[in-house]
Amino acid sequence: MELFQAKDHYILQQGERALWCSRRDGGLQLRPATDLLLAWNPICLGLVEGVIGKIQLHSGLPWWLILIRQKALVGKLPGDHEVCKVTKIAVLSLSEMEPQDLELELCKKHHFGINKPEKIISSPDDSKFLLKTFTHIKSNVSAPNKKKVKESKEKEKLERRLLEELLKMFMDSESFYYSLTYDLTNSVQRQSAGERDCRPLWQKVDDRFFWNKYMIQDLTEIGTPDVDFWIIPIIQGFVQIEELVVNYNESSDDEKSSPETPPQESTCVDDIHPRFLVALISRRSRHRAGMRYKRRGVDKNGNVANYVETEQLIHVHNHTLSFIQTRGSVPVFWSQVGYRYNPRPRLDRSEKDTVAYFSAHFEEQLKIYKKQVIINLVDQAGREKIIGDAYLKQVLLFNNSHLTYVSFDFHEHCRGMKFENVQTLTDAIYDIILDMKWCWVDQAGVICKQEGIFRVNCMDCLDRTNVVQAAIARVVMEQQLKKLGVMPPEQPLPVKCNRIYQIMWANNGDSISRQYAGTAALKMV
């Protein structure tokens, strides 16, 4: 879509539709494309992919309009639904009067009218893009008052830092995804339950994972059908889609992929060996957001830090099978204070004061998922013990038959990087895995539903959690493929398939770790 800058508005236009954003008060209006003729001196800045929303970085600072500047196709889900990753954004100050150079793709229709206020940056480096963007931030100092000058400089410094963090969040983490035709916020099971719901996609999203909900609120409140075109629900998390071939004759030496260079979808035609599509979709909750050590445990609304729902989706012919798990911080009030590496955890509230908030968390979880099997991976000795003990006490006080508690000291069982020992856990809960089932749908409708979920946690809900979730998901996938006749009953997953599958889960772990801890995961699956 084309982006225009006029005297009083930014104007987004595609076909016969146009969205006007006021540069005076940030108000949004839907108008016909022909109204561009009424705009004062519109200048085409280039092409963008869509609207993320508006944001005010700090009270007292101007509003900014956030647009998708560049996307990358991740793959296609069943039904030919494209899933895209946001790779670059454009940040437009609503207070800046001069035309902005955002390094957008040029519009062939209007390129001759682009007015570049400064010379074009030859390097696409995002840090330079940040500096160029910030050159448009000006302070209005009416008198040579030293106090006002100082306040203005501090304001500029704060705005620069916040803008830098905003750009870094989008461009460095590569953790924001969207689809124009598929609801990424909802699992296959939740979507199948509401398949008769004829409302537009954005009105059916799971509120927990609608990351840009408040940024796009001005549009959602318009309430007319025309607005549906402009609203793009975005999730923070991870998506990877691959097509695997079940070939027991292939050597693992042929697999050259690594977590840094994930395998691409195969384009060769193979009529002998069965194929299946596998997708991982992780949805990070927008509630109790924040970084490790700054956000731990539960809040007063029952939300927990680093809460992520991960869906593993298998598609064979006309059959789609889905299995979901969740991860989230131990739902008690706890923290780690200090700046040393791995500060000692402490409890911030008494057992009695925690009960209501622990209950609020699991009452919501049971309402959504019906049954919960807790897999607690924290150490049963040492500094983590205090958190594990508090968790168990709250489970006993909650005393709900739909809540099952399983403790597995990951570091004790997998000492020396022996992650294959996680099979001890999967063997012990094998019957629970089978009883939980999975969601299975085909063209005729729902064949069966998943009955409950595994809620896995360690201290950070990162490395250990990802290894265990991958192991559980693999058990489920092998059962699914055998049910569908894709795998022989007594055979494991072929070596090459298994390697690609491991890479997908490793990539998932890396992505969630970067979002919560700022670094990649330390453990492979």
Image (spheres, rainbow, N blue to C red):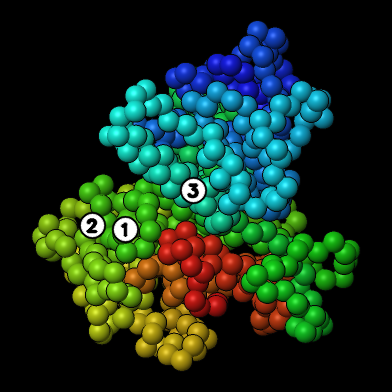
Q: Nearer the viewer, residue 332 or 292?
A: 292
Label 1 or label 2, whichever comes before in sequence order: 1
At x 71%, y 81%, the residue is 495
Q: Which residue is mark 1?
A: 295
Q: Residue most toward the bottom?
A: 416
Residue type for callout 1: Arg
Give the label on residue 418, or none.
Answer: none
The amino acid on which the numbered mark 2 sits, given as a three-letter code, is Phe
x and y, in percent, of residue 159 in the image: 42, 41
Local crowd size for mark 3, using a 10 Å CA cut-off: few (<14), some (14–19), many (≥20): some
The residue type indicated by label 3 comes to Glu
List the single residue furthest toward the top: 38
Query: Mark 2 and mark 3 in contact (Cβ < 8 Å)?
Result: no
Residue under the point 34% across and 34% down: 149
Q: Residue at x 72, y 17 (%)?
A: 16
Cα distance, mark 3 to mark 1? 22 Å
Q: Nearer the viewer, mark 1 or mark 2?
A: 1
Q: Can residue 472 be seen in the rendering of this structure?
A: no
Whole-percent x, y for residue 2 in the image: 70, 27
In the displayed structure, 363 sits above or below 200; it is below
Calculate the distance from the C-alpha at mark 1 to the C-alpha at mark 2: 16 Å
| In this picture, residue 441 sits left or right of residue 461 | right
Residue on which the image places disc 3: 164
Q: Secondary structure at mark 2?
A: helix
Q: Quadrant of residue 276?
A: bottom right
